[in-house]
Amino acid sequence: MSSQPAASPEPARVVVLGAGWWTQGWHCPHLSRHPHAIIAAVVDTSPTPRSAISELESLEALGARYGCPTFSSFDAVLEASVVFDGVIVCTSHASHAALGQRALAAGKHVLMEKPMTTDVAEARAL
């Protein structure tokens, strides 16, 4: 038996797509506390996300809170050469398939909030 401690795994670098209630109330707080995760970026088409059930921080405030860049599109993340391992798709349901497909095409892991897609053919294609 080795006397050296096991090497810690490299942290997972995650881009969070969407800055709504699930992102702000669940995903970002939990990712930020996880010892093996880093929020690589947060993306939302709106600089001021809205929710009917709670007050939300602006995209700029989320970036400051979690120490990560923010973007208005996933394409901008890819163009900026942000280093990341996977995405969490927390956007409107109709956008899940396209964002998931782009992330998979880039060789990234994808965690998609339900529903996976709004169309069976899109789900099968993923």
Image: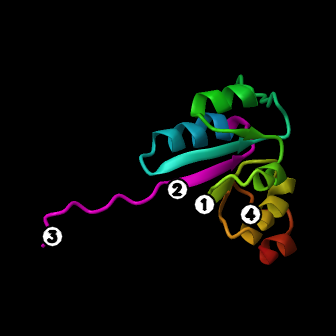
Quickly name the residue at label 1: 85
Quickly name the residue at label 3: 2
Of 87 and 112, nearer the camera is 87
Quickly name the residue at label 4: 103
- Among the two numbered marks 4 and 2 on one chain, the one whose residue lies closer to the N terminus: 2
Q: Is residue 94 left or right of residue 107?
A: right
- Among the two numbered marks 3 and 2 on one chain, the one whose residue lies closer to the N terminus: 3
Q: Is residue 7 left or right of residue 97?
A: left
Name which residue type carries label 1.
Asp
Residue drawn 60% across and 60% down?
Answer: 85
Tag 4: Cα neighbours inside 10 Å, few (<14), some, or many (≥20)? many
The span picked out in magenta is 1-21
- Among the two numbered marks 4 and 3 on one chain, the one whose residue lies closer to the N terminus: 3
Q: Is residue 5 above or below residue 80?
A: below
User: Which numbered mark, 4 or 3, is in the foreground of this view?
Assistant: 3
Q: Residue 58: x percent and y percent? A: 74, 26
Name which residue type carries label 3.
Ser
Quickly name the residue at label 2: 12
Q: Residue 70: x percent and y percent? A: 73, 38
Count of residue discs: 4
Q: CA distance from mark 1 to mark 4?
A: 10 Å
Residue drawn 62% across and 56% down?
Answer: 84
Marks 2/1 in contact by CB < 8 Å: the verdict is yes
Badge 2 marks a residue whose secondary structure is strand
Tag 3: Cα neighbours inside 10 Å, few (<14), some, or many (≥20)? few
* Snapshot quadrant of residue 110: bottom right
Q: CA distance from mark 3 to mark 2?
A: 26 Å
Q: Is residue 36 left or right of residue 53?
A: left
Q: CA distance from mark 2 to mark 1?
A: 6 Å
- Quarter of the image that includes the N terminus: bottom left
